[in-house]
Amino acid sequence: MEWSDVRIFLAVARSQSLGGAARVLGISHPTVGRRLRALEAATGQTLFQRHNDGAVLTDAGEAVLKLAEDMEASALAMQRRLAGENDQPEGVLRISAAEWFAAYVLPPVLQELLRKYPRITPELLTGTRLFDLSRREADLVFRVVPFTEAGIVQRRLTRIRYAVYAAHDVDDPTGDGANANLLLMDTSHYHYPDVAWLQQRLPKARTTFTTNSRDMQARLCARGMGLAVLPQPIGEQTPGLRRVELGEAPPSREIWMGYHQDLRRTDRLRAMADIAGRLLGDAAEQN
């Protein structure tokens, strides 16, 4: 299999069209189509599903995408070595994390990554959905539950502490919380230990708002709409909030970092994992 054909395969996969790949590579549209058909004939597999608007990877194409990217990385490394360049990690690194973690915890890590490795391009995917590492939906994932999928290399990074917060002009709850309003995370799809804990501590409190966004929870709390249990990195960085003591601390959460074992030798992933471990690991545990 020739690298030139694999290069065309990657260009089509990334641009999702033969015409787009031709423009990127500086060759003609018919040449891209001819070389792609030759590659499919050589492999005996249909790698793309063609349609009027472009081309998308088939299951067979998805299965070899990572191998093609590894071949590309090796070819680029060889070019740099022959040109006498430093062998610096480069390329896109897809990182998945909850929105609050990405906004309030990861920025120093990303800043250090770009300072040391300017050729790496982080692509940050935020949200509550758990991305599938085996399907390359993300390269590196940070989350609050351990990984149970096969083939995942994981590390417990640290423990994030939580606290109860309120706006400065909101009174502390008394007794069973009959005088309190609560701003809670939506538990219809995910389990949040802090929700159960707060409802147990203040059983008579009224739930006035639920959301799936920690940032929205913090913003409403700062507007005086109720009490909220928040990860301390959010609570301490949100203007207008103060801690409320209820006699004991809310449950904390562990932060896990994971990636697929097939990527363990990828230099840009190792670079990010090393920096995250150094800046967010147990020695730098959030207070």
Image: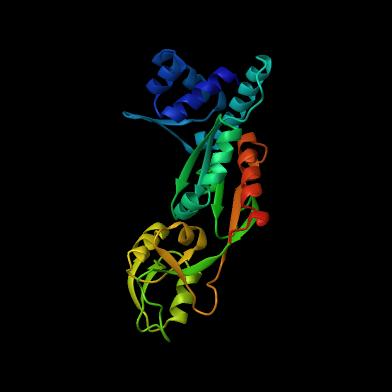
The spot of residue 79 in percent (x, y) is: 63, 17
Count of numbered marks: 0
- Which residue in the rendered view is the most extreme toward the bottom? 175
Q: Is any atom of residue 149 visible in this view? A: no
Q: Left or right: 261 with respect to 207? A: right
Q: Nearer the viewer, residue 34 or 178?
A: 178
Q: Is any atom of residue 31 visible in this view? A: yes
Q: Relative to 249, say whether 142 is above or below.
A: above
Q: Nearer the viewer, residue 271 or 20?
A: 271
The spot of residue 114 in percent (x, y) is: 55, 35
Query: Looking at the image, which residue is at 48% across and 60% down?
Result: 236
Image quadrant where one finds the N terminus: top right
Query: Looking at the image, which residue is at 50% across and 53% down?
Result: 101
* Figure quadrant of residue 88: top right
Q: Left or right: 205 with respect to 133? A: left
The spot of residue 210 in percent (x, y) is: 35, 67
Q: Relative to 36, say whether 198 is above or below.
A: below
Query: Looking at the image, which residue is at 55% across and 49% down?
Result: 141
The spot of residue 172 in percent (x, y) is: 41, 78
Image quadrant where one finds the C terminus: bottom right
- Which residue in the rendered view is the most extreme toward the front? 169
Query: Looking at the image, which residue is at 50% across and 25% down?
Result: 9
Q: Relative to 254, say whether 75 is above or below.
A: above
Please name the colour scheme applied to the rendered image.
Answer: rainbow
Q: Nearer the viewer, residue 101 or 30?
A: 101
* Figure quadrant of residue 206: bottom left
